[in-house]
Image (cartoon, rainbow, N blue to C red):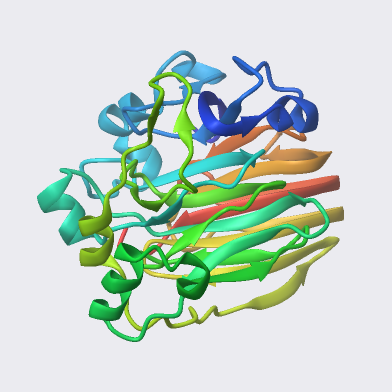
């Protein structure tokens, strides 16, 4: 089967969510505090459905289990990647994510390395990105004494920015920011600080995971190194943000026509962030537009993009 797989997003309501997913993309969201669109997901907490072709109606996890040939006969029990769009109407909780080994032992799933492409950011918006403790003991002491301003690093954010968030990094998306998140397929989150918010449904403070955060944080903080590259494929400008152990993330600025060859045997995940264009595969032409999410399986080795659009893509890394 040499055709793309279009997916139907799954939406999750969050205490910090808003209406941005409807306002920006026209999605039919479940409420005015919708925080996440799980756009390309095989995770059991929100598997996306195939919208087209012979596998229409199947969940992505089912397709992974039953038709591994579409994914280059990749190994692994679970589809390794998850693409989300997050709408942070308020600050998310400050978190740390575990590596694969810790998550396997304690959570029974993959660890969580992730990344963010900033779709929208209000003036003055910021991310929580890293920490200032020099030792694990100092980190624990600052948490227990609630020295958050001293502990947490913040960075300003603008539309088009990219941030890589490896496991062990302290992080949070701040209020007024919408991001496309590429991550390992994991729903494990260790919440270390939540701004003392009360969950209206329970009337209680949300659960924290202080010991897990202390166990899994990287100390001291090290700024991730990105292998940023840029090149042109005809009328498409390609920006590689990162190519790391679990995934690579790239941006396609389509302003004309570009003919692409896939020669690494890896499938591609594509999310159209803005505009619209034509996707040509062999003799077939597909119209793709803002808000669409699709997979190019490994049965596709050549494709053409033509039009004017902004697309964020990803592919599995060597460890996926």
Q: Relative to residue 208, is residue 35 depicted above or below?
A: above
Rendering coords of residue 284 (x, y %): 70, 31
Task: Name the foreground residue: 162 vs 256.
Answer: 162
Q: Nearer the viewer, residue 131 or 288?
A: 131
Inspect this view and state whether residue 22 appears: yes
Instruction: Identify the residue at horizontal 73%, vertical 57% (top origin).
Output: 125
- Left or right for 284, reference 58: right
Horizontal side, residue 252 vs residue 112: left or right: right
On screen, residue 140 above or below 305: below
Q: Residue at x 34, y 41 (%)?
A: 187
Q: Where is residue 271 in the image (x, y as percent from the top left)?
A: 64, 42
- In-image side of 149 versus 18 (left or right): left
Q: In this view, does 103 lie to the left or right of 45?
A: left
Look at the image and tell me whether residue 318 can be seen.
no
Q: In this view, does 79 lie above or below 133?
A: above
Residue 105 percent across, percent down from the top left: 10, 52
Dividing the picture into quadrants, the one containing residue 163 is bottom right
Front residue of 274/93: it is: 93
Instruction: Say which quarter of the image contains residue 316.
Output: bottom left
* In front of the other: 223 or 77: 223
Query: Which residue is rendered at x = 22% and y = 56% of the image?
Result: 212
Total marks placed: 0
x and y, in percent, of residue 149 in the image: 53, 69
Question: Which residue is at 67% across, 57% downward?
Answer: 260
Q: Quadrant of the C terminus?
A: bottom left
């Amino acid at each position: 089967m040499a055709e793309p797989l279009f997916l139907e997003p799954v939406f999750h309501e969050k205490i910090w969510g808003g209406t941005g997913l409807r306002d920006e993309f026209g999605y039919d969201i479940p409420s005015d505090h919708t925080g996440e669109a799980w756009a390309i997901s095989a995770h059991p907490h929100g598997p996306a459905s195939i919208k087209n072709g012979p596998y229409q109606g199947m969940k992505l996890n089912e397709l992974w289990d039953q038709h591994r040939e579409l994914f280059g006969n990749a190994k692994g029990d679970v589809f390794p990647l998850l693409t989300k769009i997050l709408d942070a109407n308020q600050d998310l909780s400050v978190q740390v994510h575990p590596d694969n080994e810790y998550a396997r032992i304690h959570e029974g799933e993959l660890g969580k390395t992730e990344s963010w492409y900033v779709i929208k950011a209000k003036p003055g918006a910021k991310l929580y990105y890293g920490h200032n403790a020099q030792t694990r003991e100092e980190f624990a002491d600052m948490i227990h004494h609630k020295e958050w301003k001293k502990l947490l690093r913040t960075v300003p954010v603008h539309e088009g920015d990219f941030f890589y968030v490896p496991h062990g990094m302290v992080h949070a998306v701040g209020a007024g920011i919408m991001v496309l998140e590429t991550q390992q397929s994991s729903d494990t989150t260790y919440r270390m600080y939540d701004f003392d918010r009360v969950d209206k449904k329970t009337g209680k403070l949300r659960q924290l995971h202080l010991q897990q955060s202390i166990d899994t944080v990287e100390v001291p903080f090290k700024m991730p190194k990105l292998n940023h590259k840029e090149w042109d494929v005809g009328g498409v400008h390609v920006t590689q943000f990162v190519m790391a152990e679990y995934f690579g993330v790239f941006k396609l600025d389509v302003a004309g026509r570009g003919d692409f060859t896939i020669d690494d045997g890896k499938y591609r995940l594509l999310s159209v962030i803005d505009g619209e264009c034509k996707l040509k595969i062999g003799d077939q032409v597909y119209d793709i537009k803002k808000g669409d999410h699709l997979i190019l399986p490994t049965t596709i080795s050549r494709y053409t993009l033509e039009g004017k659009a902004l697309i964020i893509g990803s592919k599995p890394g060597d460890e996926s």
